[in-house]
Each structure stands twice: as C-alpha cells, then as structure tokens.
Image: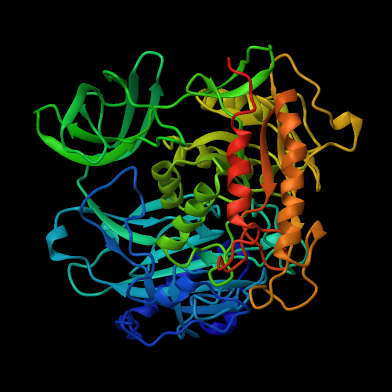
Amino acid sequence: MDNKKCMRLTKGNFFKTCIFSAAALLLTGCQMNILGSDWSPAKGPLMTEWAKDVSPRNAHPEYPRPQIVRESWLSLNGLWEYAIRPKNEPTPISFDGKILVPYPIESSLSGISKRVGEPNRLWYRRSFEVPKSWKGKTVLLNFEAVDWHTLVLVNGIKIGEHKGGYDPFSFDITDALKEKGPQVLVLAVWDPTDAGGQARGKQVKKPHGIWYTPTTGIWQSVWLEPVNKKYIESIKIESDIDSGLFHVQVQANKADSAYQVKAELMEQDSHNVKAQASGKLGRKITIPVESPKLWSPESPYLYELRLTLIDAGKRKVDSIKSYAGMRKIAIKKDENGVNRLFLNNKPLFQYGTLDQGFWPDGLYTAPTDEALKYDIEVLKKLGFNMLRKHVKIEPRRYYYWCDRLGILVWQDMPSADNKTETDKNQFHLELRQMIKTHYNHPSIIMWVLFNEGWGQHETERLTKWIKLTDPKRLVNNASGWTDKGVGDVRDLHEYPGPVPDDPGESLEKEPDRAVVLGEFGGLGLPIPEHTWQSEENWGYKEYTSREELTDAYLELLRKLQPMIKDGLSAAIYTQTTDVEIEVNGIMTYDRAIIKPKSDEIMPVHKQLYFLMPEN
C-alpha cells in the first residue's frame, strides 16, 4: 500500500491501516535505546524550581498506583520518539524527534512545546525489553492517563483502544511479545480539545482568561507489570467508624468464587497484624478493628492493608499491598438545628482553595512527585483543611499525598460540552471511571458533578446515581448558580464576595442540605518575574502590593466569620496558585512566592474552625 493511497483512507478504516503500517516499523531500526539521549526543556514563559530535577532517567520514577502495590514493575517513562501527522495518515516510518514522557507535548518539560490540534494525530514510539525474570508471567501495559483517544500497538499488533483523558487503563500484551529482544510500542493519540464534546476541563485551543493551554497525549506514567494468569484486578474499601469495621471487596481476573481472599490489617508504618479476616472472592469481607484510629486533617492515620488471593488448593496466587483510612462524612444538624458538614460525627467547618492543578513547565503534569506534594504541604501549613480539585482529575499519587498529609478533597468531574448523546454517554462513562478509580481514598469526601452549568444535563438522575454508587460520600449536584435542589449541599459562588449580592443567593436554610460557598475571592496580584506574561494579567480584583492583598484577603475572612455562625458550612477561596494569565493565586504560578503574608493569614484561618456550634 503506497503512501498516497494511505492518505486517502477514510476515518473508518484508519486503525486497520495503523496495524498494517506498524508492521513495517520492525524493519526500520526503531528499536534504538533512546533512554540516555540528550534532552533539555523547551523554552517556556516560566519554570518551577523542580524543573532542574527533571531528566530522561528520573521522569516520575515513583510507583504510580499506591493503593494496589506489587513489588515487580518497570517504568516506561523517559524519552520516546514522536511525530505529528494528519489524523488519517498511517503510522509514520520516520519520526520528528524525541519527547520526554509523561509530560504533554505542549509543555516545556516534554522538550517539544508544540500544539497538535484537532486535524492531527500524535504518534509515540519506543522499544523496551521484558526482564528475563518475568518469563511465564502475564505482562500488563498500564497507562495512568492519556488525553484523549488512544490506539496501542505492540510489535505491529493492535492491542486495543481507549477513550478518556483522565482515567487509567491497561492491556494484556503477553501474546504480542516476541520471545526475546526489543519490543516495539507505538501509540496513536487524537485529541480534539474544545472542537469536541468530551470531558476536558479548562483546556482550549486558544487560551484566554480562565481558559488554559491544552494537554495532548500521554500526561501520566506508563509502566509494565508482571502478574500471574489470575490476579487481583480491583479492590473496594469502606469504613464504618460507628461499628469499628472495615469492609473490603476484591475482584480478580479469570478467578471464580472458589477463590478466597485473606485480608490483613496492620498499624500505620508497621508489619504487625492488628486484625485479619477471610472470605470468598467478590464478596464483602468484614474486618473488625479494636479501638479504631480515625482519619482526619488533624490526624491522617492510615492503616496498612495486605490482600492475598488464594486458590481452591490453598495456594497463594497473588498478593498486593494497600492502605485504608477510617473516616465518616455526613450532613447532620448542629445544636441549633442547622445542617452542617460532619466529619467523624463532629461538625467541621471546611476551608480550602480552588485547585486547578496546572504547572507552568508541565501544564497538566507536575514536574516531579515532590512538586505534586508541595502544593498540599503549603495549604496545610497555611491552615487550610480542604481543597476543591477543579474540573481536573489528578494522578493517583496526588490523592495518596492528600491521604497521607491529611487534606479533605472535593473532587470535580472535568467539564464537557455534552452537546450530543455520544458526548453524554462518554461523560457518564468517565464519571463512573473517576468514582471507581478513586473510591478508596479517605481524603475525597465529596463528588462535584457540574460546575456553573458547564455541560449540565440530567442533573437529578446523575446525582441519584452517584449517591447509590457511593453512599459513603457527599454529592454536590452543581457548584455555583445552577443548583437543581438535589444532592447534599447548596453551593454558592460570589466574587469577590463572600457575602451574596443577590438576595436569591442568601444563606437560607434547607431541611436536608447544607449551604456552602464553592468559590469566592479571586484577589489578583501580579509579581514581576513570576508571571506567565509580563503584562495584561488578570484577577477578579487586582492589587499592587503584598500588603494591599493581605489586607483585602483578611477583610474577606472577617466578612466570612458571621456567615459561618449563620449557617455556612464550607468556603473555597479562588485559588491555590496563579494559572497562566490569572494572577489570583495564594501562590505565584511557579510556586516561588506565597503572596499574602503567611504569618498574618494563618491564625485567622485557624479561627474559622472554632466558629461553628457543637452538635
């Protein structure tokens, strides 16, 4: 098949052509070892201090899946080959250069800093060798996240496809592997960004205002994992603090109800077994915990958990390590009969920031794991006990750090246009995947379905479905302005606020729901040499010095205090950091400077938590 004919192919038979053309790759010498090749970041407007720690040999080397841990694995992060081609062309024979995975191609840390765009497809290629010790094992190829439509080939064989920009996915590549020598991995990724109706959060082709640079392709870790033919695939953990119980449910690949699961619970950072229980695969296993230690922002205690899959012959088939936190989130009435957010049966005012999760050098991808952790550490140090992860889903390690460090998370579903039934069905699929993937994190206490009406549809049905799927968490049906009267909270947005200007947006009490302030503030301060661009930066209200900003911020908190006494249960300040031209962050976009004066705002933050009545 010649190239001219390939270019005339329709979209419908594109993937068939990929398979045909990919076979030719095995003859092109692409099995080069590119891990040690030269690399440097592309020039960008602004870099973080962690950029200096990034290299092809240490690009996010940490284990990517903290709640299902196996000892043996192999990271495929590092330098890959890349090519940008019209989306209906077949697999390229020659590539354009090298890209550092897992940083998106638009970012500086990818080494490329190029746009792909809806008319094109982004190709990746690299080789790898399977360790000899994995012989006889099933080999899984794991992708933590690729944005958006991904086709995967190994040694010219189509392995599978995936649609979705935020959820992890895996393929069994065992049958496609050669007996020995280099294996060739090829990806084709298409991402329409805002030309499509898929979930994309704040990514747009032409960034402006509150809309930011897009991410295309691989933006989280890629890795290999050897497992037995029957292995633990997923786990579901629930806690019951009133009864002192953990409930654990395990699903396994190609195993039936004749298999047993042994669950062992250990103290934090200890190998000493505190409690254990066994049960049938797929059934709920109950682990009683004597004198349970509860998880909270003040004391984020995590139990260690070991789960072992055992066959009918009492042989150990698989074993994984995990962890669990015992906590409870609910809406209850305080001593004055006002609905409040209760954590572990006690009323707790929740105060945090709107967290966009963007980085000047990595865009959707934090430069390093330390950088990912840093934002949470700063919020904790400043006295925040919560964050709202805004229309983005982070890597699993992010929520691990939220669990470990102790910060409550309101998790948004990334926004989508949802114009067609296909768009809506895809949105529902990704919503299910978000909840399933992050079900076990004690830090996540609320799902936020829609933001300010963006792509809003079937709100009542979807809210009910989330509550049935995850009864252990709260549901926010719509954050800001488009509330449909369902779910657990009524969520107001006020800029700069926090006091509502519109009487219709008052703190009027409701019989079954709590009132929260999902966004307010947005006070802007550009700091020279720490902005995305030197001029025309934007905030909801702008100031010229740290002193002015601090005074204005403290004035907002003074206005917030009587609202808490009057019935407000939570408030979220916009935002954690500056993002591109937005300069309304607590920190600059490069995380180099905390803009309001820490010593002045920290004690006022802590005062907020003592303003609510007892239950």
The scheme the figure's colours follow is rainbow
Q: Is residue 282 visible?
A: yes
| Front in this rendered view, residue 383 or 253 | 383
Image quadrant where residue 295 sits: top left
Residue 10 in which image quadrant = bottom right
At a point 18% along the width and 67% down the height, the residue shown is 179
- The image quadrant of residue 264 is top left
Number of marks present in the image shown? 0
* 296 is higher (above) or lower (below) than 223: above
Q: Residue at x 59, y 32 (%)?
A: 609
Instruction: Give coordinates of residue 149: x percent, y percent.
Output: 55, 59
**Residue under the point 13% across and 65% down:** 132
Q: Quadrant of the C terminus?
A: top right
Q: Nearer the viewer, residue 39 or 227?
A: 39
Q: Examine the rendered structure and indicate whether residue 185 appears above or below residue 299.
A: below
In the displayed structure, would residue 615 be above or below residue 40? above
Picture coordinates of residue 335, whole percent (x, y): 63, 12
Of the pair 188 and 59, the residue shown nearer to us: 59
Is 11 or 203 nearer to us in this picture?
Answer: 203
Side (left or right) of 530 relative to 90: right
- Relative placement, left or right, of 565 versus 218 is right
| Camera sees residue 515 | no
* Left or right side of 298 for 426: right
At horizontal 28% and vertical 46% (from top left) the residue drawn is 69
Q: Position of residue 73 (x, y in %)?
A: 25, 57
